[in-house]
Amino acid sequence: MDFENVNTHYRMSRRGREGEYHSRFDAEVAAFTDELRSPREFNVIVGGKRLPSRSFFDDASPISSDLLVGRFARGTKEEVAQAVAAADLAYLTWSRTDLSERLGIFAKAADLMERDLFRLAAALTFDNGKDRHEAIAEVDEAIDFIRFYVKAMRDNNGFEQETLQPYHDERPHSLLRPYGVWAVVCPFNFPLAISCGMATGAMITGNTVVAKPASPAPLSVFLLHDILEAAGLPPGVFNVVTGSGSEVGDTLVNHAKVSGIVFTGSKDVGYKLIRESLARFPRPVIAEMGGKNPAIVSQAADLAMAVKGVAQAAFGFSGQKCSACSRVYVHEQVIDVFVEMLAAFAGRYRIGDPRERDTFICPIIHPKAVQDYERYVTMARQDGKVVLGGERRTEGAMALGNYVEPTIITGLPEGHHLVKNEMFLPILCVQSYSDLESAVRNANDVDFGLTAGIYSNLSHEVEYFFDHIEAGVCYANRARSATTGAMVGAQPFGGWKASGSTGKGSGTALYLTQFLRQQSRTIGQR
């Protein structure tokens, strides 16, 4: 079976179906708007059952505080224990389920997800504020993860193989076996795609899962559960518990029956999980922990291409991507013209409601993020120069949402907090350099190493960049985006240093092996 990325917008626009692309999304937004008139309650899911809850938290859309996406159960420690017990029980059967049966369930789930693609995208737009292109691309990625992992498991025979035969009377072979119950700790920025990729990686290899959705955007994990259930996934293989990090998250990841943890989120939380994974014996922790991603613009760059690529990477989904470009190093000979061009380009981006077709700068996730944005802008004005943006937007319908302007900062010292630390906001620091070696050295001089890009028409500069940059996902002369947009099966997505705990990227067969442990079996022969 060949694998092909879904790539909905690219495919439909090339076939002259751009109008259908927009009309289908708009129709699902309208349908979802009708549903929100009576917001649903979402209970903890344990062993295929929705447990009644006495306490809920409201999930308000970042689009507007008066848009209630749903009411989600405040999970308890007791419910976490029940979910782990259900997953542990289901593991006994699921881990021994024939590979072809497991793969058939996931193949069907991908088909159901593609059928419901525009509905899922509309839900994402309400839940975490993505514009239509970002939301549809996220559903595409979730489908891609499932189909690619189905193919990888099939192509590798479930990672079972005959090994060398050192003695004539012995028949050895090697196989990779699942661990047991995995805790899946989900992010708010890609609550469907990343959650689906992590959970599928665990389950398709024979493990079972207890997932904790991100509280600012929990809806997609429930929609994923419904799809997997409809595809025939047995009860208890995928359990969902919502709630706080202290009540649900800590209880889950420290449960004695949890055999592995897969997590996407902050460096501080990731490091905490890694330290705590040694409590009894080492447990695998697959942690993706963000980035402080640089782009380099040479004096030999196509500046128009570089401006577009940097702007898309810095301000797409309002900078709320672990791969977002938050630093750009520009050669001193071209920095002034580059900054002028970049400010003009980004200044044309439309800020507003992500349900509207022309919106590019969408709301950020919650009011706390707005406070962080205002604090960072104050720091920038004190120590550098804000050449674009820097304001919260509150006019009209934006008054009830979390809207801020794309912001470009120049003149900060290289050791400044904004240059060295992840912000997860539409803020870009522009730094000057005189020689490529110093640019790469400064680009590397942070804890993170996720993505990076360069623009140069000199082949030796591109080669130097690839050979010396400390990042897991690297691009050169990419107009689409300087640092974002890795595609499943094409660009393995995983970081170096503090950006990742394993050095193996998602969207590859190697990613699946992390959910498995090797066992050698030898049978004597007469």
Image (cartoon, rainbow, N blue to C red):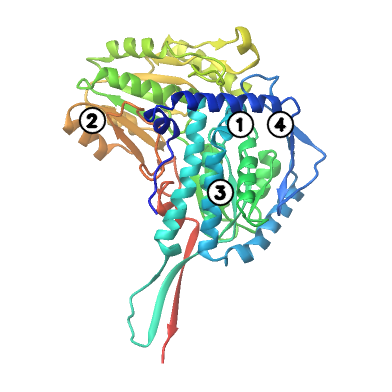
Which image quarter: residue 243?
top right
The residue wearing badge 2 is: 437
Of callouts 4 and 1, the N-terminal one: 4
Q: Quadrant of residue 300?
A: top left
Q: Answer left or right for 33 relative to 335.
A: right
Q: Residue at x 80, y 37 (%)?
A: 55
- The answer to whether any part of residue 130 appears in the image is no
Residue placed under numbered mark 1 in the picture: 123
Q: Nearer the viewer, mark 2 or mark 3?
A: 3
Check disc 1: other Cα within 10 Å, few if <14, some if 14-19, many if 20+: many
Decide if residue 173 is on the left or right side of residue 240. left
Disc on the earlier residue, 4 or 3: 4
Question: How much space separates mark 4 and mark 1, taking CA atoms?
Answer: 11 Å
C-alpha separation, residue under disc 4 versus residue under disc 2: 51 Å
> Is residue 381 placed above or below 416 in the rendered structure?
above
- Whether residue 346 is situated above or below residue 213 in the rendered picture: above
